[in-house]
Amino acid sequence: MVFSVIIPVYNRPDEIRELLQSLTLQTFTDFEVIVVDDGSDNPCRLTVESFNENLKVRYFWIENIAQGFARNFGMKLAKGDYFVLFDSDCIIPSHYFEVLNKAIKTRKLDAHGGPDAAEEGFSNFQKAINYSMTSVLTTGGIRGKLKDPSKYQARGFNMGLSKKAFEATKGFVDPNRGEDIELSIRLKKMRFRLELVEEAFVYHKRKNTWKTFFRQSYSFGQNRINVSRYHPNAVKLVHLMPAFFLLGWMMVIGLIVIGYWLPTFLFFLTAGFLVYGLWILAVFVHSTFINKSPWVGFLSIFTAFGQLSSYGVGLMTEWVRKVFRG
């Protein structure tokens, strides 16, 4: 068997149904599916077992150990030569495994990561979130578009590694705090070939509210610092950009107050408004063009602004905690 698909799930039976349904439509079918129900109060056993006739699927319920270790649990039981990891809120395009199989063979990959995209049927809010998570104007393109695919750090919602790589690394060492990035860095340090496979994308159907999206972005900032506890060089300049973004607009607010009393600061205030104004305009135009919707473009201004700011707060908060507590 070529592939083993590992899917951790927690209280999301409807999502797992959509994901499994998409797997029944694959053009390349030499794979098994292992669903690890990570301590759900609302188990999805019946949902999974309803696909027994269409998929080679196994279901396991375990006490809650968090998604990183739940993935390890599934990989230890896998029979394939290459393990593919999906989050339960993903929908898999029909060509995914055909594309991935070709990439592994032609590029001699030991591990891979793939990007996420928004399907046409997603809500405007989901499309705005997807834009914020993938645009060059927000994440710098590091989540899915790189000139050098070997620099990619895979994300757990869409990544994979060979059985050999798993046995050498023992999988995830942190249950749920940037564990995917930590594993990516460790794979490369151990000389395994991990690259972005841009064509192996998934439709990531994030079911966020404004509050949960910003909270998630906050945790992503924390996670980057957490990874640096394992790998001191994990934080690069690009990862600090959200913190600079946050500090920048806070300075603009401060200049509004100072400029009232000290007119000499009005030049800096004007410059700040110009920089952030141009960025807001660029986000609106770019998202509108990509999504073919001015409303999505408008929402993207707020999702992008909130995402960068929340990430920045999380990163700086965790950095302070690391400095004083280790």
Image (cartoon, rainbow, N blue to C red):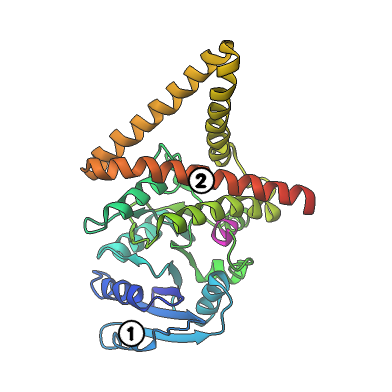
Q: Which residue is mark 2?
A: 151
> Is residue 42 inside the magenta stretch?
no
In this rendered view, identify the residue nearer to me: 112 or 118: 118
Local secondary structure at mark 2: helix
Q: Which residue is mark 1?
A: 47
* Quadrant where the image shows the C terminus: bottom right
In this rendered view, identify the residue nearer to me: 38 or 283: 283
Residue 77, compared with residue 158, is above or below; it is below
Q: Main secondary structure of the magenta part?
A: helix
Q: Position of residue 168 (x, y in %)?
A: 61, 68
Q: Position of residue 238 (x, y in %)?
A: 54, 38
Q: Amino acid at mark 1?
A: Thr
Local secondary structure at mark 1: helix
Q: Residue furthest front?
A: 261
**Mark in the foreground, 1 or 2:** 1
Which segment is the magenta one?
178-183
Q: Earlier in the sequence, mark 1 or mark 2?
A: 1
Q: Quadrant of residue 213?
A: bottom left
Q: Quadrant of residue 285?
A: top left
